[in-house]
Image (spheres, rainbow, N blue to C red):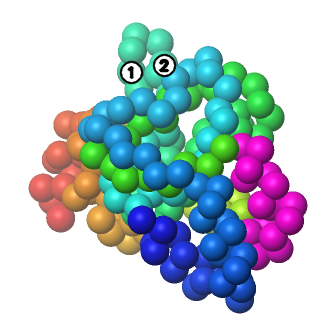
Protein backbone atom coordinates (compact mmCIF):
# COMPACT_ATOMS: atom_id res chain seq x y z
CA UNK A 1 0.00 0.00 0.00
CA UNK A 2 2.96 2.35 0.60
CA UNK A 3 5.04 1.44 -2.46
CA UNK A 4 3.76 4.24 -4.71
CA UNK A 5 4.26 6.84 -1.96
CA UNK A 6 7.77 5.52 -1.35
CA UNK A 7 8.60 5.67 -5.06
CA UNK A 8 7.25 9.22 -5.23
CA UNK A 9 9.43 10.39 -2.35
CA UNK A 10 12.53 8.42 -3.42
CA UNK A 11 12.37 9.78 -6.98
CA UNK A 12 12.50 13.36 -5.70
CA UNK A 13 14.83 13.15 -2.72
CA UNK A 14 17.82 11.28 -1.36
CA UNK A 15 15.77 10.14 1.63
CA UNK A 16 17.17 7.58 4.06
CA UNK A 17 15.18 4.35 4.22
CA UNK A 18 14.74 4.82 7.98
CA UNK A 19 13.11 8.23 7.40
CA UNK A 20 10.86 6.75 4.71
CA UNK A 21 9.71 3.98 7.06
CA UNK A 22 9.01 6.59 9.73
CA UNK A 23 6.92 8.61 7.26
CA UNK A 24 4.84 5.51 6.48
CA UNK A 25 3.85 5.20 10.15
CA UNK A 26 2.03 8.54 9.98
CA UNK A 27 -0.13 7.58 6.99
CA UNK A 28 -3.17 5.32 7.26
CA UNK A 29 -4.85 3.51 4.36
CA UNK A 30 -8.38 4.55 3.38
CA UNK A 31 -10.61 2.83 0.84
CA UNK A 32 -13.50 4.83 -0.53
CA UNK A 33 -16.53 4.31 -2.71
CA UNK A 34 -17.25 6.19 -5.91
CA UNK A 35 -18.40 9.78 -5.19
CA UNK A 36 -17.59 9.53 -1.49
CA UNK A 37 -17.12 12.90 0.19
CA UNK A 38 -13.88 13.37 2.11
CA UNK A 39 -14.69 16.96 3.07
CA UNK A 40 -17.75 19.17 2.77
CA UNK A 41 -17.90 22.92 2.53
CA UNK A 42 -17.97 24.43 6.01
CA UNK A 43 -15.78 21.74 7.60
CA UNK A 44 -12.18 22.47 8.59
CA UNK A 45 -9.79 20.25 6.63
CA UNK A 46 -7.68 18.02 8.88
CA UNK A 47 -6.15 15.60 6.35
CA UNK A 48 -3.78 15.44 3.41
CA UNK A 49 -4.26 12.53 1.00
CA UNK A 50 -1.97 10.59 -1.31
CA UNK A 51 -3.73 8.71 -4.11
CA UNK A 52 -2.64 5.11 -4.61
CA UNK A 53 -5.56 4.26 -6.85
CA UNK A 54 -8.49 6.34 -8.04
CA UNK A 55 -9.02 10.08 -8.08
CA UNK A 56 -9.83 12.95 -5.74
CA UNK A 57 -11.77 15.94 -7.06
CA UNK A 58 -11.86 19.30 -5.31
CA UNK A 59 -14.77 21.52 -6.31
CA UNK A 60 -17.09 24.31 -5.27
CA UNK A 61 -20.85 24.63 -5.69
CA UNK A 62 -22.10 27.96 -7.00
CA UNK A 63 -25.56 29.52 -6.99
CA UNK A 64 -28.18 27.36 -8.60
CA UNK A 65 -26.28 24.19 -7.69
CA UNK A 66 -23.71 24.43 -10.50
CA UNK A 67 -20.43 22.83 -9.46
CA UNK A 68 -16.99 24.01 -10.56
CA UNK A 69 -14.05 21.60 -10.45
CA UNK A 70 -10.81 23.19 -9.29
CA UNK A 71 -8.37 20.28 -8.96
CA UNK A 72 -8.02 16.56 -9.59
CA UNK A 73 -5.44 14.30 -7.92
CA UNK A 74 -4.81 10.99 -9.67
CA UNK A 75 -2.55 8.04 -8.79
CA UNK A 76 0.76 9.19 -7.42
CA UNK A 77 -0.56 12.63 -6.48
CA UNK A 78 -1.44 14.49 -3.32
CA UNK A 79 -4.69 16.31 -2.64
CA UNK A 80 -6.29 18.40 0.06
CA UNK A 81 -8.40 21.53 0.47
CA UNK A 82 -5.24 23.54 0.95
CA UNK A 83 -6.60 26.93 2.16
CA UNK A 84 -8.62 25.20 4.89
CA UNK A 85 -5.79 22.77 5.71
CA UNK A 86 -3.21 25.55 6.13
CA UNK A 87 -5.33 28.28 7.76
CA UNK A 88 -7.64 25.95 9.73
CA UNK A 89 -10.72 27.82 8.58
CA UNK A 90 -13.93 26.27 7.22
CA UNK A 91 -13.50 25.01 3.67
CA UNK A 92 -15.33 26.72 0.84
CA UNK A 93 -15.01 23.61 -1.28
CA UNK A 94 -15.80 19.91 -1.33
CA UNK A 95 -13.41 17.02 -1.72
CA UNK A 96 -14.64 13.70 -3.10
CA UNK A 97 -13.36 10.54 -4.70
CA UNK A 98 -14.88 10.20 -8.16
CA UNK A 99 -13.89 6.54 -8.45
CA UNK A 100 -13.47 3.75 -5.94
CA UNK A 101 -10.17 4.83 -4.48
CA UNK A 102 -7.33 3.66 -2.30
CA UNK A 103 -5.76 6.54 -0.45
CA UNK A 104 -3.17 7.17 2.21
CA UNK A 105 -4.32 9.77 4.73
CA UNK A 106 -2.25 11.79 7.16
CA UNK A 107 -3.53 14.03 9.95
CA UNK A 108 -2.61 17.71 9.74
CA UNK A 109 -0.58 17.70 12.96
CA UNK A 110 1.41 14.66 11.79
CA UNK A 111 1.95 16.19 8.35
CA UNK A 112 3.32 19.39 9.88
CA UNK A 113 5.49 17.37 12.26
CA UNK A 114 7.07 15.54 9.31
CA UNK A 115 7.61 18.84 7.47
CA UNK A 116 9.41 20.21 10.55
CA UNK A 117 11.49 17.13 11.37
CA UNK A 118 12.36 15.39 8.09
CA UNK A 119 14.05 17.67 5.53
CA UNK A 120 13.19 15.34 2.63
CA UNK A 121 9.50 15.54 3.52
CA UNK A 122 9.70 19.33 3.78
CA UNK A 123 11.23 19.32 0.30
CA UNK A 124 8.37 17.16 -1.01
CA UNK A 125 5.82 19.56 0.51
CA UNK A 126 7.53 22.54 -1.10
CA UNK A 127 7.52 20.72 -4.45
CA UNK A 128 3.81 19.91 -4.12
CA UNK A 129 3.05 23.57 -3.44
CA UNK A 130 5.31 24.87 -6.22
CA UNK A 131 4.07 22.44 -8.87
CA UNK A 132 0.46 23.06 -7.87
CA UNK A 133 0.99 26.80 -8.12
CA UNK A 134 2.70 26.54 -11.51
CA UNK A 135 -0.04 24.29 -12.94
CA UNK A 136 -2.76 26.60 -11.59
CA UNK A 137 -1.03 29.65 -13.09
CA UNK A 138 -0.65 27.95 -16.47
CA UNK A 139 -4.30 26.93 -16.41
CA UNK A 140 -5.59 30.34 -15.32
CA UNK A 141 -3.44 32.51 -17.57
CA UNK A 142 -3.43 30.08 -20.46
CA UNK A 143 -7.20 29.79 -20.43
CA UNK A 144 -7.83 33.54 -20.49
CA UNK A 145 -7.36 33.82 -24.23
CA UNK A 146 -8.21 30.24 -25.21
CA UNK A 147 -11.29 29.10 -27.06
CA UNK A 148 -12.80 25.69 -26.26
CA UNK A 149 -10.59 23.79 -28.72
CA UNK A 150 -7.42 25.35 -27.31
CA UNK A 151 -8.51 24.49 -23.77
CA UNK A 152 -9.10 20.85 -24.70
CA UNK A 153 -5.75 20.67 -26.49
CA UNK A 154 -4.09 22.19 -23.42
CA UNK A 155 -5.57 19.59 -21.09
CA UNK A 156 -4.57 16.76 -23.46
CA UNK A 157 -1.01 18.10 -23.59
CA UNK A 158 -0.65 18.66 -19.83
CA UNK A 159 -2.81 15.83 -18.44
CA UNK A 160 -3.14 13.19 -21.20
CA UNK A 161 -5.40 10.79 -19.26
CA UNK A 162 -7.67 13.46 -17.84
CA UNK A 163 -10.47 13.27 -20.43
CA UNK A 164 -10.43 9.47 -20.26
CA UNK A 165 -10.90 9.39 -16.48
CA UNK A 166 -13.23 12.29 -15.73
CA UNK A 167 -16.87 12.69 -16.77
CA UNK A 168 -17.67 15.29 -19.43
CA UNK A 169 -19.57 17.34 -16.85
CA UNK A 170 -16.61 17.47 -14.44
CA UNK A 171 -14.08 18.06 -17.22
CA UNK A 172 -16.20 20.86 -18.68
CA UNK A 173 -16.46 22.58 -15.29
CA UNK A 174 -12.67 22.34 -14.89
CA UNK A 175 -12.13 23.80 -18.36
CA UNK A 176 -14.75 26.51 -17.93
CA UNK A 177 -16.93 25.40 -20.84
CA UNK A 178 -20.31 23.66 -21.13
CA UNK A 179 -20.53 19.85 -21.40
CA UNK A 180 -22.14 20.25 -24.84
CA UNK A 181 -19.25 22.43 -26.04
CA UNK A 182 -16.77 19.89 -24.69
CA UNK A 183 -18.53 17.05 -26.56
CA UNK A 184 -18.53 19.02 -29.83
CA UNK A 185 -14.90 19.99 -29.35
CA UNK A 186 -13.78 16.43 -28.62
CA UNK A 187 -15.55 15.27 -31.79
CA UNK A 188 -13.37 17.69 -33.81
CA UNK A 189 -10.13 16.10 -32.58
Range of magenta residues: 108-124
Report which residue position mark 1 lands on: 66
Would you say 165 lies left or right of 69 here? left
The answer to whether residue 47 is above or below residue 148 is: above
> How many neighbours does mark 1 have within 10 angstroms: few (below 14), some (14-19), or many (20 or more)?
few
Q: Is residue 79 visible?
A: no
| Count of residue discs | 2
Residue lying farthest bottom?
14
Indicate the quadrant containing the N terminus: top left, top right, bottom left or bottom right.
bottom left
Whether pointer 1 and pointer 2 mark residues with C-beta atoms closer than 8 Å, the reply is yes
Q: Which residue carries the number 2 mark?
A: 62
Point out the residue furthest to the right here.
Answer: 116
- Residue 162 percent coordinates (x, y): 32, 59
Residue at figure coordinates x 54%, y 75% from the top left: 6
* Residue 136: quarter of image: bottom right
- Among the 4 quarters of the image, the one containing residue 22: bottom right
Q: Taking the image as drawn, is residue 112 in sight?
A: yes
Q: Residue furthest top?
A: 64
Towards the viewer: 40 or 67: 40
**Quadrant of the snapshot with the C terminus:** bottom left
Q: Left or right: where does residue 1 sit relative to residue 17?
A: left
Q: Quadrant of residue 115?
A: bottom right
In this view, 111 is above or below 57: below
Q: Is residue 112 left or right of residue 48?
A: right
Which residue is at a point 56% across and 21% down the rendered structure image? 41
Tell me the distance, in whole angstroms, between the alpha carbons under discs 1 and 2.
Answer: 5 Å
Q: Secondary structure at mark 1?
A: loop
Say which element carries label 2: loop
12 up-or-down from 78: above or below:
below
- The spot of residue 133 in percent (x, y) is 67, 58
Amino acid sequence: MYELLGNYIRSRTGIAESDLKLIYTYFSPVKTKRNELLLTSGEVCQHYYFVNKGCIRIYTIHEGGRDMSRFFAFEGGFGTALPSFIEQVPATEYMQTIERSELLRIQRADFLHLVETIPAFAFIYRQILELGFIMAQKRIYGFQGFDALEKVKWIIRHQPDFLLRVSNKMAASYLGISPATLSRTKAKL
